Image (cartoon, rainbow, N blue to C red):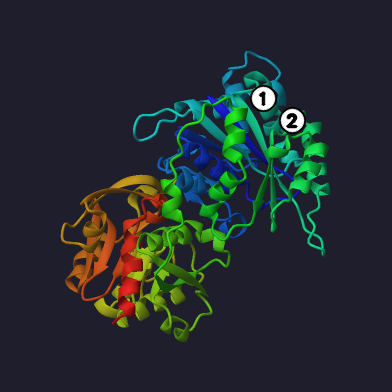
Amino acid sequence: MKYVVVTGGVMSGLGKGITAASIGRILINRGYHVTSVKIDPYLNIDAGLMNPAQHGEVFVLKDGGEADLDLGNYERFLDIELSSDHNLTTGKIYSSVISKERHGDYLGATVQIIPHITDEIKDRIKHAAESWVDKHGNHAEICIVEVGGTVGDIESMPFLEAVRQMHWEYGNGDFALVHVTLLPADNMGDLKTKPTQHSIKALRELGLEADIIVGRSSLSISEATKRKISAFCDVDAHAVISARTAPDIYLVPLELEKEGMAEVLLNLLHLEPRKPDNSWYSIVSREYKHRVIVAIITKYGVEDVYISIKEALKHAGRSIETEVVIKWLDAETYTKEDLADVDGILIPGGFGNRGIEGMISAIEYARENKKPLLGLCLGFQLCVIEFMRHVVGYKDATSEELGAGTHAIALLPEQEGVKDLGGTMRLGNYAVTLDPKSCLAGLYGSTEIVERHRHRYEVNPAYIDEIESKGLKFVGRNGRRMEALELGNHPYFVATQFHPEFRSRPSRPSAPFIGFVKACRDNQRK
C-alpha cells in the first residue's frame, strides 16, 4: 500500500478535498486502484448531528455512515463507494481508545496520546486502505489521506503526529506528502510566497516535510515564483504545482495534469508509468447545446448544504448536453413570480418546521402549472402532504414531525422510543422495487434498484389507498414503505424518499435527475 497524505496551510477552505480527489482521479487515469480517507479533527463522532448551515452537507455513505461532504467529492471523482471506516474523527478515535481502556485492552498501561491515540489513528487508516475492495474485486494500491483543518490547529496535532510516524514507517517510495497552501495576489498582481513559507515552517516544526506544494491562487504561478518557493521550502521546482481557480471542479485534475502532477507523484511513489486513460476528461468537458433554469427551494442559505444536488444536476445536464443554471429561492421569502420564469422546481431534503409552507406552495404551483418537479426525501413527504391537502381534501394534512393535524407522514415504527439522535435514522443503502410501468423504471432501466436513505418518517399506511385513488401513484416500494411517487398527466412530477444525488457520478448520472433535466428542457419547447 502506498499513501498520499494531503495537508493544508494558511487558511481553511482552500480546496484540499478537491485537490485530494483530483490526485486520486489522476492516479486512476494512470490505471491504479485508489481509495481515500478523510480525517476530520472535530470531537463529533460523525457529521450526522452537525448544523448543515455551518458545516455543509451531511454525505450519506452506503453503510449508513454520515460523513463530511468531502467524502462525496471522493466518490464522485474516483467513481467508487466508501464506508464509515473512511471518515475518521477525533470523536471516533478517542471513543475507541477509551472503550479499549475500560475493557482492559491496554493491560493497565497509562493511556496517552502517544502511542495509544496515534496508534489508533494509524491502525484505522491502514484498515480503511487495506480492506477496501472495488465493485470488480480489486484491492487498493494507493490510499489518499486528507487531513482536515489547517497545519498549526491544536485539534489536528495527534493526526499530524500519526502522519509523521507513518512517513518514517513506510519510507520513501511508499509515502508522499502534498501540502496545499495559499498564494495571495497583491494590488500589482504579484503572487506573494510568504504565507506559504510560514506554512511550510509550521509543517517542519511538526517533523513533516512536504514532497509536493500545491499553490492555490487566482493566477497561474510563474516559473520564477516556483523557483522561489523551491528555494525557501526545499521542494523541487517541478513539485511546486500551480492550482489556480478553475471554472469547474471537474477540470481541476486536468489542470494538475498540465502542471506535471502525475509525473511527480509516480516518481515519488516509485510507480511505473502506465498508458493514460483520459476518457473521464472527455465526459466532464462535454460542451452544452441547451440551457435550463431550475429553482431549488431552500431551507438553508448555504449552497454547500446542497452540494450533491448541485453536482447531480450538473452530471445529468452534461449527459444530455444541457447546462443547468440554479436559481436559489428561500422557502420563506420567494414569490410565485420567481417560479414563473424557471423551467423546473426541485424540493430538497431538510428537517424542522421552517420554510415548510413555502415548499408546499412551490409543489402546488408545479402540480397545477405542469412545471417539472423533483422532490427528494422531505420533498417527497411534502408532495404527499400537498396532494392530501389540495386534492384528497384533508386541509390539515401534515407530518408527525411538524405538529398536530392529519398525519399523512408518520414516524417509522422502528423510530418509536429512539432517544439518541446520532446515527439512528434509517440510513444508507436499501433496495427499492419499482413499478414496471413507471417513468422511474424506464429511466433506471430496471425495476430493482438500490439507493441511499436518511429519514425517520414515512407515508402513513392508513392513507395510501385513498391517495392513490385520486391519481398520485406510489411507484417505488420497500416492503410496506413507500419510496417513490409519480403523478400522471404531468411533464414530470417525481419524488423519492431516498437520496439519488448521493450515488450520482459524472460518468453515471442519477436516473431521476436525468429525467428531471430532460423534462425541463423538453418543456421549454411546448
Q: In the image shown, does 123 or 36 lie closer to the viewer? A: 36
Which residue does the image show at 31% across and 77% down from the upper left?
Answer: 523
Q: In the image shown, does 523 or 303 lie closer to the viewer? A: 523
Say how many tags the image has: 2
Residue 94 in view (yes/no): yes
- Where in the figure is residue 241, as x and y percent of width and height? 67, 44
The amino acid type, in three-letter code, at marker 1 is His
SS for dot 1: helix
In 3D space, how far apart are the residues under numbered discs 2 and 1 (Cα atoms)? 8 Å
How many residues crowd around disc 2 within 10 Å: few (fewer than 14), some, or many (20 or more)? some
Image quadrant in which you'd find residue 120: top right
The amino acid type, in three-letter code, at marker 2 is Leu
Which residue does the image show at 32% across and 83% down from the upper left?
Answer: 369
- Where in the figure is residue 357, as x and y percent of width and height? 44, 76
In the depicted structure, whether residue 162 falls above or below residue 89: above
Rendered-image quadrant of the C terminus = bottom left
In the depicted structure, whether residue 181 falls above or below residue 393: above
Which residue does the image show at 63% across and 32% down from the upper left?
Answer: 94
Please give left or right for residue 178 compared with residue 251 in the image. right
In the depicted structure, whether residue 70 falls above or below residue 159: below
- Where in the figure is residue 8, as x and y percent of width and height? 69, 43
The single residue placed furthest to the bottom in the displayed view is 337
- Where in the figure is residue 191, as x and y percent of width and height? 78, 54
Q: Mark 2 points at which residue?
A: 208
SS for dot 2: loop
Give the mark nearest the N terminus, 2 or 1: 1
Whether residues under marks 2 and 1 lie with C-beta atoms below 8 angstroms apart, the answer is yes
Q: Name the residue under label 1.
A: 167
Residue 422 in view (yes/no): no
